[in-house]
């Protein structure tokens, strides 16, 4: 149960909700003029430079670190679709798990962990990440992790319940003018 009721849907809010009809979108409709820009912004990571797999691994790790079940629920199908195994997903969802057998993934997760725990990554984690990712991807990873910390705060503070099923990402891409990078 949410902290306060979802807003009533007039024709304008119904159209906005239909862009990505999940509980998060519905609660965001309480804001004036922010829902579609936020959805567009968050969706823009789907066509960013970082790979779809890195994107989804970052998101589920942020969900685990912030104890935001909603983010994990929504992104579980996507992280698996991008090639992350069930076993690796289990490790990503365990905040105590720090070593991933791949130097770039270990650096990525150490950076995300530091960023989330400290609201700003440590220099050593940044330096290690830069050994594996170019600066534009480091910037995207940083912005992505921060975006999903913000999203987790909104979801948890307003106690948005899980949807009956994860959102339809291909429909969201079509409705919001995005598109998935499937590399």
Image (cartoon, rainbow, N blue to C red):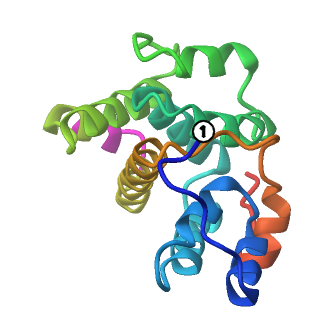
Spot occupied by residue 108 in the image (x, y as percentages of width and height): 42, 34
User: Badge 1 local density, few (<14 within 10 Å), some, or many (20+)?
Assistant: many
Q: Which residues are magenta?
A: 127-133
Report the residue at 75% width, 41% height from top.
82
When the figure is inspected, residue 22 is found, relative to residue 44, above or below; the finding is: above
Spot occupied by residue 124 in the image (x, y as percentages of width and height): 17, 32
53, 9: nearer the viewer: 9
Using the rendered view, name the quadrant where residue 90 is placed.
top right
When the figure is inspected, residue 37 is found, relative to residue 23, above or below; the finding is: below
Report the residue at 57% width, 58% height from top.
5
Judged left or right of residue 109, residue 35 is right
Spot occupied by residue 22 in the image (x, y as percentages of width and height): 72, 56
Using the rendered view, name the quadrant where residue 11 is placed.
bottom right
When the figure is inspected, residue 147 is found, relative to residue 129, above or below; the finding is: below
Residue identified by numbered label 1: 70
Using the rendered view, name the quadrant where residue 40 is placed.
bottom right
1, 64: nearer the viewer: 1
Q: Is residue 134 visible?
A: yes
Judged left or right of residue 62, residue 122 is left
Q: Is residue 177 visible?
A: no
Q: Quadrant of the N terminus?
A: top right
Q: Residue reaching furthest left?
A: 123
Report the residue at 42% width, 17% height from top.
95
């Amino acid at each position: 149960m949410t902290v306060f009721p979802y807003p009533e849907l007039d024709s304008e809010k119904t159209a906005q909700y239909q862009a990505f009809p999940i509980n998060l979108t519905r609660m965001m409709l309480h804001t004036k003029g922010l829902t579609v820009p936020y959805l567009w912004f968050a969706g823009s990571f789907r066509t960013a430079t970082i790979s779809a797999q890195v994107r989804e691994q970052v998101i589920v790790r942020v969900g685990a670190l912030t104890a935001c079940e909603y983010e994990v629920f929504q992104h579980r199908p996507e992280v698996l679709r991008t090639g992350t195994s069930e076993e690796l997903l289990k490790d990503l969802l365990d905040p105590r798990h720090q070593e991933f057998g791949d130097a770039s993934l270990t650096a990525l997760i150490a950076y995300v962990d530091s960023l989330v725990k400290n609201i700003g990554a440590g220099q050593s984690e940044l330096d290690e990440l830069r050994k594996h990712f170019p600066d534009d991807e480091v910037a995207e990873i940083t912005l992505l992790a921060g975006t999903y910390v913000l999203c987790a705060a909104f979801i948890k503070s307003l106690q948005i319940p899980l949807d009956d099923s994860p959102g339809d990402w291909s429909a969201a891409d079509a409705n919001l003018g995005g598109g998935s990078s499937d590399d």
